[in-house]
Image (cartoon, helix red, strand yellow):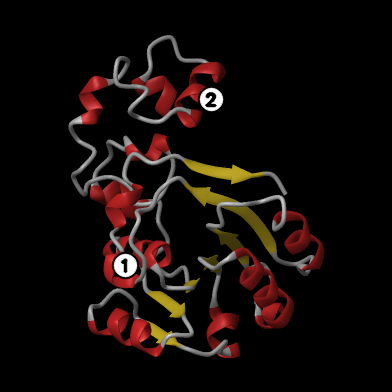
Amino acid sequence: YVAQKYVSNSSLENLSYVVSTSLNDLNDRIPSYISELNNDSGFVASTSVTSIWKGTQEEYDAITDKDTNILIVGLGMIGGSYARGLTKKGLKIHAIDTDEDTIQYALENNIIAEGTTEADPAMIGRADVVIFALYPHIFKEWIRDNQQYLKSGAIITDVTGVKVCVVGDVQNMLRDDCEYIAAHPMAGCERLGIRNSNEKIFHAANYIVVPT
């Protein structure tokens, strides 16, 4: 749909090109979109295609289930940026982080609706989608130790920048009734921690999805 609407002579190859190419590289083909990247009318965290979303807020709301329960595990710079962006889109975000100060900061600044420093079985069990913003070895340990609390049908995804040492291990140990979508947003900055989080790091950023 995006290729048909925004790219001349659209085809499957054009759509693939749009998905796999950053908006900076598309500057010569769709320059009119570049000036709009910094506004807040489009999607927050997604692919280059959704970074040029031209629909209205009402159209966005119509395709977004605000009742989806999203849990973020790890509220550092990336996890915190996810939380900020998704909260601004009207979703209620729950979070787990081992640092009490991080949880309190997120609550006091309305970045999350609920948070804890423990792997709370009830909070995990309510989650429809779990976003893991953890170091690879911690992510794998968390799945090993806590996956029994996930609801049947839960979708989990991650932001880890390395995949060879993660995808196979997680896929092999994860329960059959849960789905793992391995991913990595091509976004970030040199600063750490939730106080440096900013949902705009995802604007115009590619989002890599790895086969599992």
The amino acid pointed to by label 1 is Thr
Sequence-first tag of 2 and 1: 2
The residue that disc 2 covers is 16
Q: What x and y, as percent, mark residue 81?
A: 35, 62
The structure residue drawn at horizontal position 40% and vertical position 36%, both measured from the top left corner, is 48
Say whether marks 2 and 1 touch (CB < 8 Å).
no
Left or right of residue 154: residue 111: left
The amino acid pointed to by label 2 is Ser
Q: Which class describes the residues within 10 Å of circle 2: few (<14), some (14-19), or many (20+)?
A: few
Seen from the viewer's position, the closer of residues 10 and 63 is 10
Left or right of residue 128: residue 51: left
The structure residue drawn at horizontal position 77% and vertical position 55%, both measured from the top left corner, is 168
The outermost residue toward the front is 190
Quadrant assignment, res 199: bottom left
Q: Taking 106 as reference, is 24 above or below it?
A: above
The residue that disc 1 covers is 87
Disc 2 on helix, strand or loop? helix
